[in-house]
Image: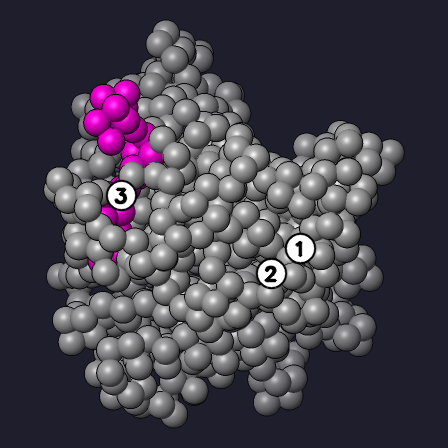
């Protein structure tokens, strides 16, 4: 296996390289003005670590896999084309009105409750750029009014005159009958052929989102068109750079659906938040290899803290109507909760609450924390960790980023100590305590609302800041076991390397399996089979286009079901890919009922209300070889000499503790280190708090557990 995997975050660009039987990792600062610069810097460092030049590596790898933040950056900066939207006449206000509650989408709860101060986000499509055309398809997909082509030609001319640089076509009920959307695309090509207008994108909403829900579907298409140009130029430019350095294969882009694909089979919308999703994919692989069924995946980077779950009952959590930026969309995305708590999260004093708050604002990589000595003046989590003694100013990020402790102290004194009256160490402890509490609260809410107990899980802590804070937030949460995975600081990049090529296609259908009024059961599953076949064909075509032979393609069928008119829909993995009759349908109903009861509690089944299928989904994928992750093992060796000692301030202690510092590279697998202790590697620092011990694993892994009374007395 020879593979390059890169994950670009808000602060660092992470690279994982598998080449010639060797595995290595590297980090570089993210270069927001040109992401490919940070990409190549991280790759060059990884190549040097294994004694290879970049051209030799790129010419010999099987694939380059890339989790990008290009789309996220474009949304933040609002640097996209002027979009013209063509919709059904009478529905011109669907997008501007945002379902009447768009002011709260993507905002914290306190802002949602602030109705007097509520405001909608800056629109991606201005009202003058929305044009309605006469046509109508009903809820069953039947044409009620034929498309008036003269309306389309007039609308296209009007939008081009107003500066349209991209077209989105979002007609009502087009997911049930796309005839009119395809006709609009044809007319645009006739009026403005490519040689006349240039490479202007035309995005049809039914191709981006196959699920009903007019606002979310049209918004998905708008976002896709808005990001298309930025993604095309950014990824194409990177591909050219890679080719100039010897790479000859197609580049693979990770998707937020949990898979990856070549550029020619990737929608821009699928790349949003793909980096954190790659980390969850690596968690699933580790769960199987370590035989750890219940894992809470926590990724603490420089900007954010991402939370995901892997459960022993194999339930996979998707969000089918996620909010991207501040817009509700319709695309299947692996569910993750993101919190503004990273190494660069800015601390401040809130006068109203007389308290220290941290995040969600971040210093990022430019200027970065105050201690980076790049002009940052705001105190951050990293500054607090440096002041408390957890970080070595001369050996941060392998010595590539020297830290200035005096600047960290000044930032904390100016912004926290002066308004609060706290001493320097007290203020730094307050910052760290608040960050740990924020992370613990977020984890508890995410787990509890899904019906699980956090204490039944082990925490998988990764990202550059994960091992620094794992003991802290697990202490608050009541979790007694933390797993630091192999290559923890670049674990999301490793996850990108472990992903399978995968595509998800879904379609809204209206099938009543059991009618509560007539008391009849569906006997003819031909409509369900037709939808499965249509989506399966689309999935196969996606993979064939990328050169995958038919015999390697795997298909998985899922359906969204509900009781009667309930709003709650449950995704069910279908036991069959084709249904022969009533018996097969009843097997599906039984699986749905069990899943529903597991989710909402015993006795919650309600078949008397009727049973319906709302959405059919087909996952087409091809399995790839995964990077083997070696499980840890425990030995009795504890007499390891420390390389140095450093004064550290731990929670609940006002006096410094002389803390042994160990070099991770010099520790043999199985070695047990009792806290308090610091273990330093080139990419992260492990903080073992008093009352915890750490077992050194292979490939940079470790396990931290709370000391039992028996262990403490022996130690």
Q: Which residue shows up at 71% across the image and 55% down it?
A: 411
* x, y percent for residue 127: 80, 57
Residue 243 image-quadrant placement: bottom left
Looking at the image, residue 591 sits to the left or right of residue 279; the answer is left
Q: Tell me the SS state at disc 1.
A: helix
Instruction: Give whichever of 261, 311 is nearer the camera.
Output: 311
* Closer-to-camera residue (39/260): 39
Separation (CA) of disc 2 from disc 3 = 27 Å
Mark 1 neighbour class, 10 Å CA radius: few under 14, some 14 to 19, many 20 or more: many
The residue carrying mark 3 is 673
Task: Please name the residue that numbered disc 1 is placed on.
Answer: 409
Which of the 4 image quadrants contains residue 115?
A: top right
Q: Secondary structure at mark 2?
A: helix
Q: Nearer the viewer, residue 568 or 297?
A: 297
Is residue 577 rendered to the left or right of residue 611?
left
Does residue 27 sit above or below 633 in this rendering? Answer: below
The Cα–Cα distance between marks 3 and 1, rounded to whole angstroms, is 30 Å
């Amino acid at each position: 296996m020879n593979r390059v995997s890169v994950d670009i975050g808000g602060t660092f660009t992470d690279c994982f390289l598998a080449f010639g039987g060797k595995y290595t990792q590297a980090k570089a600062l993210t270069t927001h003005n040109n992401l490919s610069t940070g990409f190549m810097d991280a790759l060059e460092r990884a190549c040097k670590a294994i004694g290879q030049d970049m051209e030799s590596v790129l010419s010999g790898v099987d694939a380059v896999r890339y989790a990008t933040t290009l789309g996220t950056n474009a949304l933040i900066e609002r640097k996209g084309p002027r979009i013209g939207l063509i919709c059904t006449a009478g529905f011109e206000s669907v997008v501007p009105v945002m379902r009447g509650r768009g002011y709260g989408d993507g905002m914290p709860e306190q802002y949602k409750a602030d109705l007097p101060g509520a405001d909608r986000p800056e629109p991606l499509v201005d009202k003058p750029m929305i044009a309605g055309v006469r046509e109508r398809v009903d809820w069953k997909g039947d044409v009620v009014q034929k498309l008036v082509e003269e309306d389309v030609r007039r609308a296209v001319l009007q939008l081009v005159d107003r500066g349209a640089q991209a077209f989105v076509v979002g007609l009502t009920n087009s997911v049930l009958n796309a005839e009119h959307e395809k006709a609009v695309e044809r007319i645009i090509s006739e009026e403005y052929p490519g040689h006349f207008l240039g490479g202007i994108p035309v995005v049809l909403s039914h191709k981006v989102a196959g699920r009903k829900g007019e606002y979310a579907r049209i918004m998905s298409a708008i976002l896709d068109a808005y990001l298309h140009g930025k993604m095309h130029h950014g990824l194409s430019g990177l591909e050219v750079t890679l080719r100039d350095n010897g790479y000859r294969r197609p580049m693979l882009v990770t998707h937020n659906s949990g898979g990856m694909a070549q550029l020619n089979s990737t929608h821009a919308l699928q790349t949003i938040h793909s980096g954190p999703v790659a980390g969850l994919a690596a968690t699933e692989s580790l769960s199987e290899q370590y035989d750890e069924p219940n894992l809470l995946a926590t990724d603490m980077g420089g900007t954010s803290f991402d939370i995901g779950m892997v459960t022993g009952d194999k339930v996979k959590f998707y969000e089918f109507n996620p909010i991207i930026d501040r817009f509700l969309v319709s695309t299947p995305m692996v569910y993750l909760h993101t919190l503004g708590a990273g190494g660069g999260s800015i601390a401040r004093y809130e006068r109203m609450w007389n308290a220290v708050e941290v995040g969600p604002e971040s210093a990022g990589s430019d200027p970065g924390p105050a201690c980076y000595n790049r002009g940052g003046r705001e105190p951050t989590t990293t500054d607090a960790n440096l002041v408390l003694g957890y970080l070595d100013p001369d050996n941060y990020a392998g010595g590539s980023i020297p830290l200035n402790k005096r600047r960290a102290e000044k930032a904390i004194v100016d912004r926290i100590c002066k308004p609060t009256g706290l001493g320097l160490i007290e203020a730094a402890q307050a910052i760290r305590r608040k960050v740990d509490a924020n992370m613990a609260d977020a984890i508890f809410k995410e787990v509890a609302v899904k019906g699980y107990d956090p204490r039944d899980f082990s925490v998988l802590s990764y990202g550059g800041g994960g091992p620094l804070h794992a003991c802290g937030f697990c202490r608050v949460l009541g979790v007694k076991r933390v797993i630091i995975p192999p290559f923890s600081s670049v674990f999301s990049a490793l996850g990108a390397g472990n992903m399978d090529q995968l595509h998800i296609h879904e379609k809204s259908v209206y099938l009543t399996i059991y009618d509560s009024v007539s008391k009849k059961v569906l006997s003819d599953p031909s409509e369900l089979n037709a939808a499965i076949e249509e989506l399966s064909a689309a999935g196969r075509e996606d993979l064939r286009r990328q050169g995958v032979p038919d015999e390697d393609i795997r298909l998985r069928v899922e359906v969204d079901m509900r009781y009667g008119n309930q709003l709650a829909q449950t995704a069910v993995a279908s036991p069959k890919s084709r249904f022969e009759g009533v018996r097969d349908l009843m097997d599906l109903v039984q699986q749905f009922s069990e899943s529903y009861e597991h989710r909402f509690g015993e006795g919650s089944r309600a078949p008397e209300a009727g049973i319906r299928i709302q959405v059919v989904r087909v996952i087409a994928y091809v399995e790839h070889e995964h990077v083997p992750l070696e499980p840890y093992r425990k030995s009795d060796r504890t007499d390891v000499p420390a390389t140095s000692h450093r004064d550290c301030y731990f929670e609940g202690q006002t006096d410094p503790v002389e803390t042994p510092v160990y070099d991770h590279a010099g520790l043999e697998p199985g070695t047990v280190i009792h806290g308090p202790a610091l273990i330093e590697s080139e990419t992260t620092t492990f903080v073992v708090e008093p009352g915890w011990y750490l077992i050194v694993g292979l490939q940079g892994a470790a396990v931290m557990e709370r000391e039992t009374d028996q262990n403490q007395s022996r130690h």
